[in-house]
Each structure stands twice: as C-alpha cells, then as structure tokens.
Image (cartoon, rainbow, N blue to C red):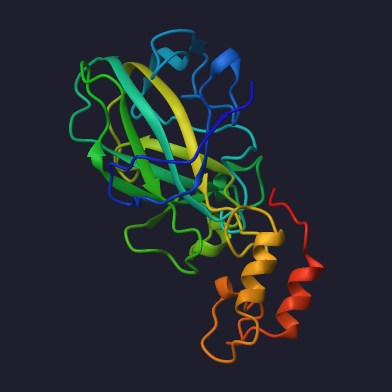
C-alpha cells in the first residue's frame, strides 16, 4: 500500500513552521514500510493495532541508551531536500515501558550524511536540531512531533548544529552537502552529543512524514494546477499593462509588463497539467 498523502500538518515544536504543503505519511497499513523505518534492533515489527491509529512499528525490547527511530533505505524521506523543497519532517511516538526514566530528553531531528561512503561509518556526520518538546513518558500515549526543515538555506541555519560520528568525519561540515544529499533521517531521544545509560525500552513509532512545497506549473496564473483557458483569459485581461504587473497578472518574464513575450510564453505551455 502506498503512503498516505495529506495536505495539512499540525506543528508542536521549535524548529517548526506551519505551512500549506504536500505531506507524505507512512501509516504502515498493509505491512507497508516506505523508508525501512526501525529502532535498530531485531525485535521490531509492524503491530496491526494500537497505533495512532491502526498499525504501527513496535519494538518490544530495545536495549539502548537512546532510541533512534530512523530510515534504513533510500526513499521519499531521504535525498535532495533542497531540490524537493522539503519544509518539514515529523513522527508520532509512544513509550510503553523503560527501566528507569526518560524524563527531560528533548526529541532531536538528525539529517545524516554518509560522506558518499555508505560502507564506512567512520567518516559520517550530521546536522541536527533539538526540539522544545520532550520524548514520551510511560502513560502519556502517542505524541506528535514536527520539525521545520530550512532546505533553502545555504548555510547552517539558526538552531542547528553539526555532529561528527567518526575519526574521519570532515572537520568543517557544510550544510549544503547534507541538505542536498540526506542519506538517513533520524529522530534521537535526547541531545545527541550526550551519552545516557543503557536501558530496556518498549517503544512505538507511527506516521513518519515529510512535507514539501511542489514547484508550481509555469503559466498557471490562477493556481489550479493547469494552464488553460482561465489562465489565458487572466493574461489577456491585463494585456498591455506597462508598469507594475506581477506574475499573477500574466507577467511571466517578470519584467513589469504584460506583452507579446508573456503571451507567447503562456501559449508555449498551454495545456500543461501540474504533476
């Protein structure tokens, strides 16, 4: 079953922005697991009930210092976030049991780079952002987390930091390198620069999601995802404007007027339908 596609997203954290975007959500229906989501142990499985709602990915015995729900294969959740105009990522989490306490740990989003050597972890590094909301505690039920992804920024954005994972990691990581080639999406239970005691966890994840702003169709003046008679009429209504015209008026070359060049540009893409 394909991931569910929605058009709205609820935000609850710092590093988050509310925006109208297309959102792809893996609901685990029918055993689907786009992205190969896991907590990293062999005990994980898709539980058919108890999720938020329906099926969810469940790990009943995770022995670790910090759960890290994460992708394991290339998918919609990885790749060139800038070219795809990714605006946010999110996940729903639940905690059924832990040996001691998980209190006080913020959930962190991590964008990992394998430095173009996927078989060699020693040169891996990442950019990360810690959110304001802590990871779930036992009895709190499902909690939704969403993080804004400033994919169009060209330098390390405010609130983000780099972390190096091995002795061969680049000493001066570049935001552009990771945001244009995200090899793994990770959500980390806590500050990834700290070490915590190992505990036994019973955890679940549901609805991992990624939102992006699709590029509009060139010539789609009325925003209905195609270039048709309505767009042509909109341009002709403003034809001859010589000053102050904007794109929606039909100024396709954005030179401030609506003239023959704009009409020719629209006719060249007339009949286009947005993907």
Q: In this view, does 68 lie above or below 151?
A: above
Q: In this view, does 248 lie above or below 134?
A: below
Q: Is residue 136 visible?
A: yes
> Residue shown at 78%/77% (left/top)?
264
Image quadrant containing the N terminus: top right
Q: In this view, does 252 lie above or below 130?
A: below
Q: Position of residue 124 (x, y in %)?
A: 54, 48
Quick one: which residue is furthest to the bottom in this view?
242
The number of numbered discs placed on residues in the rendered structure image is: 0
Q: Nearer the viewer, residue 219 or 4?
A: 219
> Residue shown at 65%/42% (left/top)?
118
> Residue shown at 65%/73% (left/top)?
235
Q: In the picture, residue 271 is in which quadrant?
A: bottom right
Q: Which of 107 and 227 is in front in this view?
A: 227
Q: Is residue 219 visible?
A: no
In the drawing, does residue 3 fall left or right of residue 101?
right
In the drawing, does residue 56 fall left or right of residue 220?
left
In the drawing, does residue 236 fall left or right of residue 98?
right
Q: In the picture, residue 65 is in which quadrant?
A: top left
Q: Is residue 135 above or below residue 125?
A: above
> Residue shown at 33%/32% (left/top)?
144
Q: Which of 121 and 230 is in front in this view?
A: 230
């Amino acid at each position: 079953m394909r991931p569910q596609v929605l058009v709205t997203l609820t935000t609850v954290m710092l590093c988050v922005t509310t925006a109208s975007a297309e959102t792809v959500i893996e609901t685990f229906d029918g055993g689907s697991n786009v992205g190969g989501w896991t907590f990293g142990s062999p005990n994980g499985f898709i539980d058919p009930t108890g999720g938020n709602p329906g099926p969810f990915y469940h790990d009943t015995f995770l022995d670790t210092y910090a759960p890290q729900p994460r992708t394991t294969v290339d998918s919609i959740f990885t790749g060139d976030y800038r070219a795809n105009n990714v605006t946010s990522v999110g996940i729903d989490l639940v905690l059924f049991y832990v040996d001691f306490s998980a209190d006080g740990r913020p959930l962190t989003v991590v964008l990992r780079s394998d430095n173009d050597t996927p078989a060699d972890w020693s040169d891996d590094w990442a950019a990360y952002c810690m959110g304001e909301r802590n990871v779930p505690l036992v009895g709190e039920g499902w909690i939704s987390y969403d993080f804004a992804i400033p994919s169009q920024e060209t330098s390390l954005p405010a609130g983000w930091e780099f972390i190096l994972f091995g002795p061969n990691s680049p000493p001066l990581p570049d935001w552009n390198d990771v945001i244009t080639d995200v090899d793994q999406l990770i959500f980390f239970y806590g500050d990834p620069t700290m070490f915590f005691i190992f505990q036994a966890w019973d955890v679940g994840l549901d609805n991992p999601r990624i939102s992006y702003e699709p590029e509009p169709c060139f010539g789609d003046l009325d925003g209905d995802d195609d270039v048709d008679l309505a767009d042509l009429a909109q341009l002709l209504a403003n034809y001859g404007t010589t000053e102050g015209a904007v794109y929606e008026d039909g100024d396709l070359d954005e030179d401030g007027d609506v003239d023959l060049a704009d009409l020719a540009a629209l006719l060249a893409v007339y009949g286009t339908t947005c993907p």
